[in-house]
Image: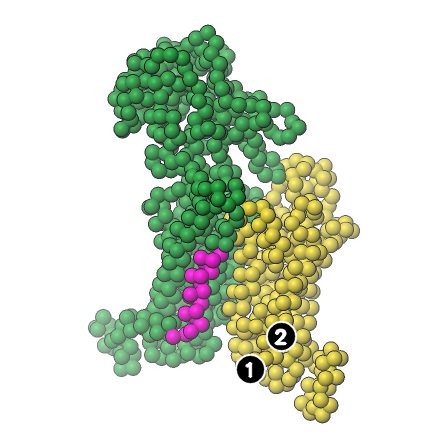
């Protein structure tokens, strides 16, 4: 460092001695002594919290005082739908269940006054299951045929393995087999009942000796795509099973039928004329049910509920304030001429801008993180109290959202600083940054544009950074509307954030070049 | 205006009283014409409005009859973007003078501060209305050529866009007026807060934050209420041509809400301008 500095004239050497830390201190002093900026920072925190809480303050679906409702949680802590019609007995110890599924049909209501549509939904399910208990969210493994995705083995809600493809039909029955050996459950499928293929084998640690096992049917709601949007209607699935072949220690007596979860959950529903049930004909069963055994995802199938990012809608308001501050941090110096003093004191202009970025970015990071950390618990508690479901997330995800919101604010503030340096005019700089962040988001989520164009907008504009707040999960085995309008960003959280980071880095880099190359 | 003039003392020698409002108008027009990038901003507003409108018209498809799209509104989607530039222009007309200290000269030359604000408002609004007319007409014309190719055909229930159609004409005129009111809003806010960055932040915040918050409000009644009071969503109701009864607010009432916001901003701005030191 010192060898580099020796050729410099005395005036600059003095600045060099203090180095970057002195510059940083100078910039920090400038920032904290302007009362307007300090007030603005406090205002940024407040509006982020206030807008977030007010935006999600609507009265609950059942009015006040209905008490908290929650999504059932699966073994992994994720929100699940665990609603299906089950015909069951108890199985103690090792054993197995083999049955032929002769048909899988379904009926869906497509609208008032229209005849119901025949046919099973793509993810309508009928098959055999072994489950810890009838409690929602308890561990399970199941082998099933689906309406449009062949035979599958699923376990513990998120695990999904494809078996033989092809639909069940009159002349193409599917034989399903589920075998328990200790904690290991293995699923098999066969087209003729004699040659079996193993689909998958799962370990369910801690599964009790006695489990519920039997036949089930479930159907998520029917999704209809129309040009005016996506609609969902009630749908049921019916599975016709042959005579079961039981191995192991099964409880005696008759089979009993239960709608697990009491109703069809948030992703399924019964119409006025359909309900779950089963009939026993000869040795076989016919089981009808609605609902789903699957993780909850965003979109209409989520039901009346909030996801974590909903509470952070105030981030937009906070960002507008931070953008104004970030821009003013440099344009203010241009306007008053302070910048000439600044670059006389610290001739390394890149260092000045770096210190400014660090100060304004650091402040914005603190604003974003503090606001998110305060808003989330208050918002969640309030929403639960008003009878809304809140989409549960793991602590790691929540931490990512809180830190991500801080980084989002910091990056946008640095972007504003860079654009402010380039344009020198605060009005144009603020307008440009606000518009480039808020407008694409608005256009993409308002539903005006088709999904393709919306996703493109959230890929290439700085608004991509909001992906860092997304907590809604995507599962291929659950049909929903995975679009920006329902809270799904086209890019993964940190990928989307890095798009924004790229813009900020570009603006900052150009700003350094411009500041170095031009008179102030 | 005559009220303002008659209230003046007759013996004024500074010239402000005599020429009055017309002189102030000429002064503001000269400033707008010669200083800053007002012309460029107008061009940018037109280009963005038309460009975004074209992009939207190209992206949206209507595969069958009853796709429920509002072709007129689609054509003028660009107004949501163009208004940001209009706001910048309006804010700069006031804040630019505070930034350079020019405002002190202006107020010395024309001591009647409300006349200054009135002149600024007249000049800026006129310029914005003119650019807005160009932008809206160009958007409609472009969409008229693009939309039929995307399924907005007679067979699907969409006649070619034409100003001879009552609702389309109302949407077009309303959109131009909308942009004029946005300019007034920007002017009022800028007069009240003076600093350019803060002013534009407040204006864009007012415009864009309501619809963003509306995304998470899941109570239909609250959502309607929000759309009724928000300057942008209520104001842009004037562009709607389909499903009018289903809208939370009627077209002209919506524009009236924006007009109320603009009036309030100008009143506060005017009051502060009179009361405060420049």
Which residue in the protein does label 1 denote? B277
Shown colour of chain A? green
Task: State the yellow chain.
Answer: B
Q: Earlier in the sequence, mark 1 or mark 2?
A: 2
Region of the chain picked out in magenta, as a range = A33-51
Q: In this view, does B249 lie to the left or right of A475?
A: right
The local secondary structure at tag 1 comes to loop
Q: Position of residue B195 (x, y in %)?
A: 52, 73
Q: How far apart are marks 1 and 2 (CA)?
A: 13 Å
Q: Is most of the magenta stretch helix, strand or loop?
A: helix
Which residue appears farthest toward the top when viewing the image? A282
Instruction: Please state the chain letter of the residue tagged with numbered disc 2 in the rendered image.
Output: B
Q: Which dot marks residue A401?
A: none
Which residue in the protein does label 2 denote? B270
Q: Position of residue A430 (x, y in %)?
A: 50, 65
Picture quarter with the N terminus of chain B: bottom right
């Amino acid at each position: 460092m010192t060898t580099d500095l020796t050729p410099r004239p005395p005036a600059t050497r003095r600045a060099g001695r203090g180095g970057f830390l002195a510059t940083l201190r100078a910039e920090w002093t400038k920032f904290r002594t302007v009362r307007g900026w300090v007030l603005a920072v406090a205002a940024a925190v407040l509006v982020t919290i206030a807008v977030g809480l007010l935006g999600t303050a609507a009265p609950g679906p059942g009015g006040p005082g209905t008490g908290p409702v929650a999504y059932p949680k699966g073994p992994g802590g994720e929100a699940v739908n665990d609603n299906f019609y089950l015909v069951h007995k108890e199985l103690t110890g090792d054993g197995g269940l083999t049955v032929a599924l002769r048909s899988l049909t379904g009926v869906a209501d497509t609208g008032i006054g229209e005849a119901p549509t025949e046919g099973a939904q793509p993810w309508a399910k009928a098959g055999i299951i072994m489950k810890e208990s009838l409690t929602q969210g308890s561990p399970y493994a199941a082998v099933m045929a689906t309406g449009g995705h062949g035979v599958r083995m699923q376990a513990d809600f998120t695990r999904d393995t494809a078996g033989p493809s092809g639909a069940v039909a009159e002349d193409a029955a599917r034989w399903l087999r589920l075998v328990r050996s200790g904690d290991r459950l293995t699923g098999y499928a066969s087209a003729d009942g004699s040659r079996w293929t193993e689909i998958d084998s799962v370990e369910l640690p801690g599964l009790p000796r006695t489990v519920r096992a039997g036949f089930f049917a479930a159907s998520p709601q029917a999704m209809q795509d129309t040009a005016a949007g996506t609609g969902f209607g009630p749908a049921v699935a019916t599975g016709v099973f042959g005579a079961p072949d039981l191995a192991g220690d099964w409880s005696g007596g008759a089979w009993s039928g239960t709608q697990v979860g009491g109703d069809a959950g948030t992703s399924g529903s019964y119409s006025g004329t359909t309900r779950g049930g089963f009939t026993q004909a000869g040795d076989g069963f016919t089981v009808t049910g609605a609902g789903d055994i699957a993780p909850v995802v965003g979109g209409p199938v989520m039901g009346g509920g909030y996801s974590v990012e909903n509470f952070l809608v105030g981030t937009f308001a906070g960002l507008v304030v931070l953008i104004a501050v970030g821009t003013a941090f440099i344009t203010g110096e241009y306007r008053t001429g302070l910048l000439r003093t600044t670059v006389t004191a610290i001739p390394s202009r890149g260092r000045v801008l770096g210190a400014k970025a660090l100060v304004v970015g650091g402040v914005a990071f603190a604003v974003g993180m503090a606001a998110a950390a305060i808003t989330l618990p208050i918002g969640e508690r309030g929403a639960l109290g008003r009878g809304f479901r809140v989409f549960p997330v793991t602590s790691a995800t929540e931490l990512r959202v809180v830190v991500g919101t801080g980084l989002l604010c910091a990056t946008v503030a640095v972007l504003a600083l860079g654009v402010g340096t380039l344009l020198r005019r605060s009005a144009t700089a603020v307008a440009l940054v606000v518009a480039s962040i808020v407008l694409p988001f608005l256009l993409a989520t308002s539903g005006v544009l088709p999904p393709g164009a919306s996703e493109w907008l959230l890929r290439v504009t700085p608004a991509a950074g909001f992906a860092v707040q997304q907590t809604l999960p995507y599962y291929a085995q659950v049909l929903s509307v995975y679009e920006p309008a329902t809270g799904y960003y086209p890019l993964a959280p940190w990928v989307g954030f890095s798009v924004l980071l790229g813009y900020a880095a570009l603006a900052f880099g150009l700003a350094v070049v411009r500041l170095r190359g031009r008179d102030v | 205006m005559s009220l303002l003039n008659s209230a003046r003392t007759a013996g004024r020698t500074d010239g402000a009283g005599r020429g009055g409002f017309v002189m102030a108008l000429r002064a503001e027009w000269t400033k707008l014409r010669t200083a800053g990038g007002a012309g460029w901003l107008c061009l940018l507003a037109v280009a963005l409005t038309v460009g975004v409108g074209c992009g939207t018209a190209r992206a949206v498809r209507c595969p069958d009859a009853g796709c429920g799209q509002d072709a007129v509104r689609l054509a003028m989607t660009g107004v949501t973007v163009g208004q940001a530039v209009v706001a910048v222009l309006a804010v700069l007309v006031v804040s630019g003078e505070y930034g350079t200290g020019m405002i002190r000269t202006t107020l010395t030359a024309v001591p009647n501060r409300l006349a200054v604000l009135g002149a600024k408002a007249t000049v800026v609004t006129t310029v914005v209305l003119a650019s807005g007319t160009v932008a809206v007409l160009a958007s409609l014309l472009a969409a008229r050529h693009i939309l039929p190719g995307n399924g907005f055909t007679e067979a699907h229930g969409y006649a070619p866009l034409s100003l001879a159609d009552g609702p389309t004409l109302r949407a077009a005129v309303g959109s131009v007026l909308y942009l004029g009111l946005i300019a007034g809003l920007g002017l009022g806010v800028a007069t009240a807060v003076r600093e350019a960055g803060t002013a534009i932040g407040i204006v864009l915040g007012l415009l864009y934050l309501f619809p963003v918050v509306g995304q998470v409000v899941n109570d239909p009644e609250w959502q309607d209420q929000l759309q009724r009071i928000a300057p942008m969503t209520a104001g842009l109701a004037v562009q709607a041509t389909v499903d009018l009864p289903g809208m939370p607010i009627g077209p002209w009432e919506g524009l009236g809400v924006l007009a109320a916001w603009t009036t309030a901003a100008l009143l506060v701005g005017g009051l502060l301008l009179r009361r405060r030191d420049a």
